[in-house]
Image: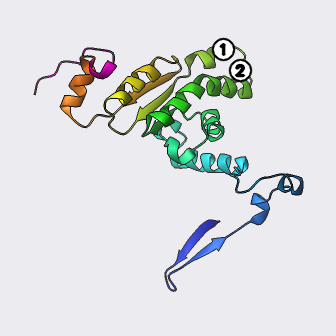
C-alpha cells in the first residue's frame, strides 16, 4: 500500500495498491506457513534508491535504525548500497548486527565483483547505540566493540557520571583517556 497524496478538499488519502508488485508465486503459497514475514527485495531496493535521492547521493548522511530494518537480509541490501552508518537501541540488536558485519561487507564486495580486496579492507560499518546503557549492558558493548575490526561500535550517554564511569573502566568497559577540555 502506498500513500500517493492527500486530497485537501475531502481530507481523504488515496491509496494505490499494485498487487503485481507484491504477489507471491503459487508454488510458494502452497508451502508457506502462515503467518509469515515476506520481504519483497525489489521494493527494499527501490526504497533504498529513494533514500539515496533524498540524501543527494551521500549515503553517509543516513543512519537507519536496526529496529525498523529488522533483518540481516535487509541490512545486506543497505550495505550493498554503500550505507555504512546504522543505529540501534539494544545490545541484542547490536550483537546480531556486529556478528554479521564482516559477512555483509564480504558479500557486498563480492556482489560488486571487486576482487582487489581494497574495498573490503577499507569498508568499516559504524554502529551507534542510541540509548543510554548501564551495568551488564556496558560489559556487552565492550565485548561487541572487539568482535570485529569491520564494525565500529559507539554509544550515547545521558550523564557526565555515566561517561566518567566508562572512561575509567567501570562496569567492565575498557579505559581510554577523554580529550581534555576546559569549561
Residue at the spot x=24%, y=17% of the render? 168
- Residue 182 quadrant: top left
22 or 123, which lies in front? 22
Badge 1 local density, few (<14 within 10 Å), some, or many (20+)? few
For numbered disc 1, what is the local secondary structure?
A: loop
Question: Whole-percent x and y of residue 175?
Answer: 29, 14
In the displayed image of the protein, which residue is found farthest to the right?
A: 27
Judge left or right: residue 91 versus residue 111.
left
Residue denoted by label 2: 114
- Residue at left 31%, top 32%? 134
Residue under label 1, please give it: 117
Residue 9, placed above or below residue 177: below
Residue 110, image quadrant = top right
Q: Main secondary structure of the magenta part?
A: loop
- Mark 1–mark 2 Cα distance, whole angstroms, equals 7 Å
Secondary element under disc 2, as helix, strand or loop, is: loop
Q: Is residue 171 magenta?
A: yes
Q: Which residues are magenta?
A: 170-181
Instruction: Work out which residue is located at the far bottom of the displayed protein and give it.
Output: 10
Circle 2: is it few (<14), some (14-19), or many (20+) Cα within 10 Å?
few
Q: Residue at x 23, y 23 (%)?
A: 165
Q: Are marks 1 and 2 in contact (CB under 8 Å)?
A: yes
Amino acid at each position: 500500500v502506498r500513500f500517493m497524496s492527500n486530497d485537501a478538499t475531502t481530507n481523504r488519502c488515496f491509496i494505490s495498491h499494485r498487487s503485481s508488485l507484491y504477489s507471491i508465486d503459487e508454488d510458494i503459497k502452497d508451502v508457506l506457513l502462515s503467518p509469515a514475514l515476506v520481504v519483497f527485495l525489489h521494493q527494499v531496493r527501490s526504497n533504498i534508491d529513494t533514500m539515496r535521492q533524498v540524501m543527494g547521493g551521500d549515503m553517509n548522511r543516513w543512519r537507519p535504525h536496526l529496529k525498523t530494518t529488522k533483518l540481516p537480509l535487509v541490512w545486506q541490501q543497505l550495505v550493498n548500497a554503500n550505507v555504512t552508518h546504522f543505529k540501534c537501541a539494544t545490545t541484542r540488536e547490536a550483537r546480531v548486527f556486529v556478528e554479521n558485519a564482516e559477512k555483509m561487507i564480504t558479500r557486498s564486495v563480492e556482489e560488486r565483483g571487486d576482487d582487489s580486496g581494497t574495498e573490503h579492507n577499507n569498508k568499516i560499518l559504524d554502529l551507534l547505540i542510541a540509548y543510554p546503557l548501564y551495568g551488564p549492558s556496558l560489559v556487552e558493548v565492550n565485548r561487541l566493540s572487539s568482535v570485529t575490526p569491520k564494525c565500529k561500535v559507539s554509544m550515547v550517554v545521558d550523564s557526565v557520571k555515566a561517561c566518567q564511569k566508562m572512561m575509567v573502566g567501570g562496569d567492565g568497559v575498557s579505559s581510554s583517556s577523554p580529550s581534555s577540555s576546559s569549561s
